[in-house]
Amino acid sequence: MLFITVLFLVVLLLLAYALSTDKGKNTVHARRSKSAIVTEPVHAMTKTNSKALHAN
């Protein structure tokens, strides 16, 4: 009976943690605002080596 009670409390605490609000720098909203700051086009960020693409 003690095991079931402890297991129930652990599951309840995990549920409460999962439903709590996100705080910190690595949340969806923080990442979205950081990506809006970037003004470089995507093709300028990716650098490809044309010699590596043409292997003879």
Image: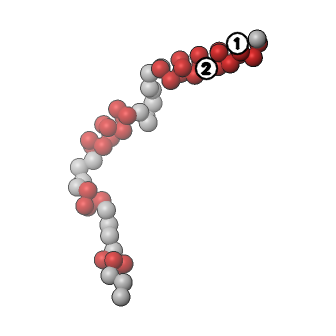
Residue labelled with disc 2: 11
Q: Residues within 10 Å of mark 2 (few under 14, many from 20)?
A: few
Display coloring: secondary structure
Kind of element beneath mark 2: helix
Query: Quick check: marks 2 and 1 in contact, CB under 8 Å?
Result: no
Task: Find residue 4 and report its image quarter.
Answer: top right
Q: Earlier in the sequence, mark 2 or mark 1?
A: 1
Name the residue nearer the viewer: 8 or 48: 8
Q: Is residue 23 above or below residue 56?
A: above
Give the quarter of the figure containing the C terminus: bottom left
Q: Nearer the viewer, residue 17 or 1?
A: 1
x and y percent of residue 52 in the render?
36, 78
Binning the other alpha carbons within 10 Å of mark 1 as few (below 14), some (14 to 19) or many (20 upward) gives few
Give, as a three-letter code, the residue at label 2: Val
- Which residue matches tag 1? 5
Q: Amino acid at mark 1?
A: Thr
Q: Secondary structure at mark 1?
A: helix
What is the x, y in percent for residue 14?
57, 22
> Relative to the observer, which residue lies in front, 15 or 49?
15
With respect to residue 52, does 2 lie above or below?
above
Residue at left 37%, top 34%?
A: 28
Indicate the position of residue 47 as horizontal and vertical percent values: 32, 66
Residue at image coords 30%, 43%: 35
In the picture, measured across the screen, residue 18 lies left or right of residue 50, that is: right
Residue at 44 percent across and 26 percent down: it is 22
* Residue at the spot 35% in from the left edge and 32% down from the top edge: 29
